Amino acid sequence: MSNLFEGIARRALFTLDPEAAHGLSIKALKSAMVPGCLPDRDPRLATTIAGLTFPNPLGIAAGYDKNAEVAAELAHLGFGFVEVGTLTPRPQSGNPKPRIFRLVKDHAVINRLGFNNEGHAAAHARISGRRRAGILGVNIGANKDSEDRAADYVAGIACFADVADYFTVNISSPNTPGLRNLQTRAALSELLGRVLAERDAKPKRIPVFLKIAPDLTEPDLDDIAAECLAQKLDGVIVSNTTLSRTGLSDDPKAGEAGGLSGRPVFERSTIVLAKMRQRLGPEMPLVGVGGIDSAETAVEKMRAGADLVQLYTGFIYGGPLLPGRILRGLSQICDREKLAQPSDLRDTRTADYATRDIPA
């Protein structure tokens, strides 16, 4: 019955403009119209990385709860960690609408939102004023018109150091002009140096992760990996949305500008994940993102080298019961494979994926 109701709700939401539907889903979570359905906790799913113990390895990626409005409610759906943002120092409206497009046949989304958010102060007030549930990540970015983008990231560390369990430095959105240039070695070196100096000045050492794009060349990956190791970064999130349109079905919206997410990104992002695992070695925490919508796809990211996984587009198509289904599926995989924990499968296919070419 719950799956039937969820299907009806999804069809109703899909009759709306995607951005309007997203806003309605946030309101539903805030008003408790979507009841918490936290599955029974399986201790085998607990994962410790970067000094943090996650109740399970499944998180919701930044982009859904941009303004830190429903972090606790998302945790009660089963997510082991919630990443809010991307947040910029000053509020900004983002790019002109329409700016989100569903590609239903492909279980995909194209967005060109452009870091629309209410700014640091509003999000910090919400986080400070609400109950905490689970691990909270804060994804930080730069204002579009910033004259010193690195300073915007430093400001994010300064603002949220008292409430964040970890930070994500997002330099990989394709929707802020020039942002991905921060992935070059020299720019990344300066950025991470300033960000980590601010972090290290705080009383509590908060892990800092870097979120990268899936549209990088092999030399790009070499440079990013070398810089992450040199700076002793706490982890890398692979990956953000792609500018590629490889593998899409015939949909007129496929030509819309913006970043593509969902099932078509799975292979590309998983290949990049595996290549980064080989470059970074076995100790660096990696978070796999891109095309996850089932326990099987989550485990495949682990086989390619991920310690944790995140989803967003899968949540759009799978609905609020999806986290519970994935967690139950992970427990069943542990039973079937006689695993102490899903991470026992980590790296069993890293070499396979890493030898593949990144799709054009």
Image (spheres, rainbow, N blue to C red):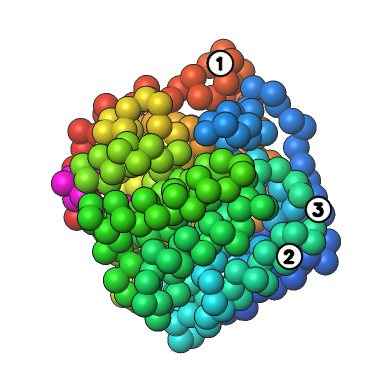
User: Secondary structure under badge 1?
Assistant: loop
User: Disc 1 marks which residue?
Assistant: 339
Question: Splitting the image into 4 quarters, where does residue 262 fall?
Answer: bottom left
Q: Does 298 appear in magenta?
A: no
User: Identity of the amino acid at label 1?
Assistant: Leu
Q: Earlier in the sequence, mark 3 or mark 2?
A: 2
Residue at x 74% of width, y 70% of height: 27
How would you rate the neighbour count of disc 1 (Cα within 10 Å): few for under 14, some for 14-19, many for 20 or more? some
User: Disc 3 marks which residue?
Assistant: 131
Q: Nearer the viewer, residue 184 or 257?
A: 184
Residue at x 36% of width, y 51% of height: 193
Relative to residue 244, is residue 274 depicted above or below? above
Instruction: Locate residue 266 relative to residue 198 in the image: left or right.
Output: left
Instruction: Locate residue 212 relative to residue 32 in the image: left or right.
Output: left
x, y percent for residue 307? 48, 32
Residue at x 78% of width, y 65% of height: 30
x, y percent for residue 235? 44, 40
Q: Earlier in the sequence, mark 3 or mark 1?
A: 3
